[in-house]
Structures are given as structure tokens and as C-alpha cells.
Image (cartoon, rainbow, N blue to C red):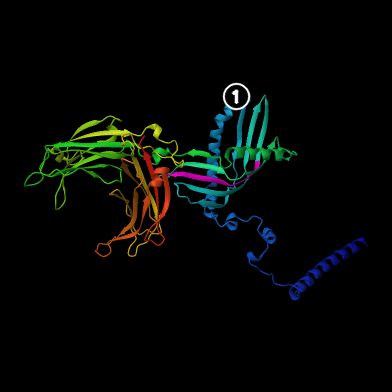
Amino acid sequence: MGFLSTLLSLCGFGVGVSSGLVVGYFLFIYFQPTDVKDPVIRPLVEHDSESLQKLLPEIPLWVKNPDYDRVDWLNKFLEYVWPYLDKAICKTAKNTAKPIIAEQTAKYNIESVEFETLTLGSLPPTLQGMKVYLTDEKELIMEPSIKWAANPNITVVVKAYGLKATVQVVDFQVFAAPRITLKPLVPSFPCFAKIFVSLMEKPHVDFGLKLLGADLMSIPGLYRFVQDIIKDQVASMYLWPKTHEVQILDPTKAMQRPVGILHVKVLRAVKLRKKDLLGASDPYVKLKLTESKLPSKKTTVKHKNLNPEWNQEFTMVIKDLESQVLELSVYDWEQIGKHDKMGMNVVPMKELTPDEPKVLTLTLLKSMDPNDVSNDKERGQIMVELTYKPFKEDDLPKDFQESGTVLKAPEGTPPGGGVLVVIVHEAQDVEGKHHTNPYARIIFRGEERKTKHIKKNRDPRWEEEFLFMLDEPPVNDRLHAEVLSTSSRIGLLHPKESLGYVDISLSDVVSNKRINEKFHLIDSKNGRIQIELEWREAS
């Protein structure tokens, strides 16, 4: 009887389950509910703030703030290189901490402190967005928003007094908003001399700390206490306006600032070789410093004279004493046609002794090639007097980035005078009617200086510096700056075109010592030119 009831119950269970499945499938397929409506799809702008918070609990900064840029490409880059970056960072951390740990263990009688494991985990930091500031100074300012929820495994083993303790850091989180400033921007790789880092707000730092397997952060009150200590300590060191400075290059060398002035006195030449078939030659001397964009300086022409005397003085700016060379070339002036070269020689600046006049008698050569057999021919000699006047250490500011910091004029500058420095940075929105191959022309007291030509560019950047030695401050003078364009095609139709000009009063430069502004160009629709002006007084 018991066996029969069991068999019947099993059969009833099987028939009931099978029937239920068949009926349920039939109802699901052939009977559709009538009260189901299609979901309403609305744009995000039509949702209220509460609905948006539910849909998007963490909205990226580039969505909320239009001045933040998306940097997905940088996050992708970090994701790919993180395994290698993790190892490099941990290795550097170990090497940096090793001498510090050795010093502290000896002080507190600790046997050893070692990293048992050190890895930052598999999750890289994420940049939620980045804001970039544009200024007229030589700097780049960035403000990234960093969020890092890491899964590190940092285990430190401490041995002291015969005991061993293991401390482990887990579940590390950092939310920070740093400001990173690269300045000054220089023409030497990596193109900036220093990095300044500061925090725009107190960072959020969260982590788990295990000692002997127990989580210390779960102790009541300890978590909040540690949080406040970390925030206060970090804020006291890095919260803006306080900064952490990292020097990459020496600013004085990277910016190629002038190191001094070269005074050149061309005395005379003797026994010059005649170049003209009929009569004597008409010699003059051309002087130029290598690695300088300034035009060559020339003496007067001495007509029909193979032993000319000039006694003319020139001043030239030296930027690199080790590499720059003074080139002296003697030419035979011709009224028509090319001027013939009579000979040349060079004087390396590193051979000069500061503040000591040096009279040199140089043999003229055809070229500076030591293998040129033509150098054996007699071409005459030239006598010059050279004096190198370096800037004094007191005249060089410790930091060129300080606003208003200006070098002093070199020793030997006429009393009451100085040096006017003109730095042509860039132009914007310049456009010609027929061509746009811009270059800048600077005219001051009849002297003309030009920047390099840049082809087919409405926003050219030159970053060229010009210097004018003056006997008195240019209080009542004006500087003429003009942007021009020359045709790249050969032809007489529209060979040159003005893209705009501006006349700058120098009275503000003399009183303020330095200005760096963008000037609107006259006769240009939207054109502007950025020029930095410095007045360096004689010490």
C-alpha cells in the first residue's frame, strides 16, 4: 500500500508539472496584456535634476562645465601603459624610500622595514576632464580632474625586538584637482624649464589599512581622524597658492638669455690683395656672430685703398660664450654686381677674457676649411680690438618668470642709457588679399629688423628677439611694428602686401620696465600682434 501511494504521487507530480508548463507556454504565446505601453523617451534636457542624478550618478566634468575638455585618448593611453608604468613607479618608490627607511630604522632601533609586495594594482587613474588656460606669458597651465579607485597590494614587513608585524594597504582611492603649470616655455627640449604643481582644493583620500590581518580603519573614530590629518598635511604643503616646484632645465641656459656684450673695434687692414683689374680695391668689413638672427654689421667703404684704416666700433650681443664665433669678412665693394670676397677669419668667443681688451692680428683666409689649398695664398691681415663685457651675477635674476624682473644693461653701456629689448612673439588673424606669407618688421630710430617668413599661415609664431643699444631712455620715442606678406611666386604683380601695423609708445616701457601685450593692427580687420618690450637700464 505504501509503495502504491508513492508511485501514484510521483505520477501525479510529473503530470502536474508537465501540464503546468504546457498551459503556461500557451498563455504566454497566445495571450498578450492590453495595458502595456511603450516607454516614453525624452531628451536629457527635459529631465529635472533629481531624475538626472538617478540616471547619471557621476556626470563627467566635461559635461557639466564647457571649459573642461574630454581626454578619452589620454585615459586610453594610461590604460595601455599602466602595467609598465606601475612597475616603473614602484621601482622608483622603492629606490627613493630605501635610504629614508635606513636612516629611520637606525634612529628607532628597528631591525628592518621591507616591502614584501608592492604593486599599485591593475586600475589606472582616470582623468574626468582637463581645463587649459591661455595666457600671454610663456607658460602652459592645466587643471585635470583626477579620480583613482585603485586595487593596490602594498605589504610592509617591520621587524623589531624579535617581533614581526605586517602592514597592508588595500582599497586605495584618491580624488584630486591639481593645477600643473609648465613655465617658462623655452626653445630647448622638453620645451619647458620648470613644473609647478598645486592643489586647487583639499583632496579626498581613502584607503584600508590592515595590521596582523585586522582592518584598523574599522576602529570607531580612527577613520575620520586619519582622513583629517592627511587632508590637512597635504593642504599645508600643496594647496594653492602654495606650489611644489620641479626644475627640469636651467632657465638661464634654456631661455638663451644674453650673457654679455661684445665690443668690437675694427682698426685697420694691411697688404690686402687687389681684386680689381684696373686700380685698387674698395674694401669694407662685415661682422657677424654665429647663431644670431641679427643682421651683419658693416664698416664704411674705403675707396682705392689696400691698407685701409677704419677705427670703427660696434656692439654685439652674446648669448652663448662657448659656441658663438665672431666672423670677420673683408669685401671689395662694387657699384654694379656682386661684391668680391677678399678674405675672412673667425674668433671664438670662449677665447676672450672678460673685461680685458684684446688686440688681434688675423691673417685673411679664403675659407675656414683647413684642407683648402687656396688658404696658402697671401690675402693680407686685419687688426681688431675685442672686449667682452659679461653680465654681472647680481644683474641676473634668480627666476626669469617673476613678473617685472628685467636684466640690467651690460657694463659699458653709456651712462643714462640702456638696452631696449623687443621680443616679437606671434600674430593672430592676419590675412592678405592676395597672399598670406607673413613676417614682422620692426623699425626704431631708423634701424630696421625683420623676423623670418612663414608661408601660408594666418596665425604665425616667430618668438624672435631684437636689441637696440641706446644712449638715453626712449621716453618720447615710438616703435613701429608691421606685419607684411611677400608673394612666394615670381612675378611683378602684388609682390609685397601690408597686413597691418601699429605704433607703440615706449614711455610705459621705460616707466614699467617691461610690458607684454597684444596690439590690434591698424588696417587689419581682426589682426593682432603680441610683442614683449623690456627696458634694461645701465647699472
Residue 161 in the image: x percent, y percent?
67, 24
SS of the residue under disc 1: helix
Nearest the eye: 99 or 363 = 363
Residue 536 in the image: x percent, y percent?
37, 40
On the rendered structure, is 235 left or right of 266? right
Q: Is residue 489 above or below residue 227?
A: below
Q: In which image quadrant can residue 174 be found?
A: top right
| Residue most extreme to the front | 476
On the rendered structure, is 524 left or right of 356? right
Nearest the eye: 41 or 435 = 435
Tell me the magenta residue range.
Answer: 170-185
Q: In which image quadrant can residue 300 be found?
A: top left
Q: Main secondary structure of the magenta part?
A: strand
Q: Is residue 483 magenta?
A: no
Residue 497 in the image: x percent, y percent?
31, 61
On the rendered structure, is 158 left or right of 458? right
Q: Is residue 30 above or below residue 384?
A: below
Q: Is residue 251 above or below residue 164?
A: below
Q: Is residue 256 visible?
A: no
The number of numbered badges drawn on the structure is 1
Tell me what residue is drawn at x 56 percent, y 33 percent.
97
Q: In which image quadrant can residue 490 be found?
A: bottom left
Q: Which amino acid, mark 1?
A: Ala
Nearest the eye: 68 or 433 = 433
**Quadrant where the C terminus lies?**
top left
Residue 130 in the image: x percent, y percent?
54, 52
**Quadrant where the N terminus lies?**
bottom right
Nearest the eye: 414 or 88 = 414
Q: Is residue 176 magenta?
A: yes
Few, some or many C-alpha atoms within 10 Å of disc 1 (few <14, some 14-19, many ≥20)? few
Label 1 belongs to which residue?
106
